[in-house]
Amino acid sequence: MPYVEVTLPVNADRSQIYPILKDMEKYPEFMADLVSVEVIERKDNTTITKWVSNVDGRIIKWTELDNFDDTNMHISYKQTEGDLKKFQGEWILTPVAGGTEIKLTVDFEFGIPMIAGLLNPILKRKVRDNSMNMLTAIKERMENRA
């Protein structure tokens, strides 16, 4: 099962970053292969979101449950249905000298054993690249605002 973890320090307080992370419908602005994110349901500290991604011409769709811990500024997510056998992870914001370290984890499984050996390394690289691109976009947004 591929697991991806990316981190990036950002010169901003986590209280400034967390609202951007919670606004999942805008994620396609940060992730080139992400086609859309739609909030299906919002209640208490959870959302159910529907995602569509284009990975090298292959459309991957899933629905996930997102849990928001506003006190600790932490987000966890887990696929409830979709094209992957497993897709879950979390956003962790850790205060560091000069700002915040953003960590994004993605734990996934394609679910077709015969081709998993071929596709998992490709998907892992794509997920890592997309995740780092997302963190970089957030960093640039936070550090270059006037």
Image (tube, grey):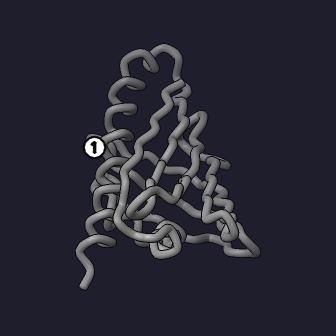
- If the image is split into quadrants, where does the C terminus sit? bottom left
Q: Nearer the viewer, residue 137 or 31?
A: 137
Q: Please determine whether, in this image, residue 36 is positioned above or below residue 90.
A: below
In the displayed image of the protein, which residue is found farthest to the bottom? 146
Find residue 144 and report its image quarter: bottom left
Residue found at the very far right of the displayed protein? 44
Instruction: Residue 90: give x, y in percent of width and height.
Output: 58, 49
Residue at far front of view: 97
Along the line of sight, which residue is nearer the eye, 13 or 56? 13
Up the image or down, 7 lies above or below 46; here it is above
What is the quadrant of residue 32 in the picture? bottom left
Q: Height in image: 57 above or below 38? A: above
Q: In the rendering, at what x and y percent does residue 128 appear?
A: 36, 39
The reply, left or right, for residue 141 in relation to residue 37 is left
For residue 22, which quarter of the picture? bottom right
Q: Residue at x 46, y 75 (%)?
A: 16
Residue 83 visible in image: yes
Residue depicted at 58% across the width and 63% down the height: 49
- For label 1, the residue is 57
Please tell me whether residue 9 is drawn above or below residue 89 in the rendered image.
below
Image location of residue 67, percent across then percent down: 68, 60
Query: What kind of residue is marked 1?
Result: Gly
Seen at 51% across and 41% down, the residue is: 106
Crowd around label 1: few <14 · some 14–19 · many ≥20 (10 Å): few
Which quadrant does the N terminus fall into?
top right
Q: Is residue 24 visible?
A: no
How many marks the image carries: the answer is 1
Q: Nearer the viewer, residue 105 or 102?
A: 102
In x, y percent, where is residue 140?
26, 66
- The secondary structure type at the circle numbered 1 is loop
Observer-nearest of 128 and 84: 128
Q: Residue at x 59, y 34 (%)?
A: 85
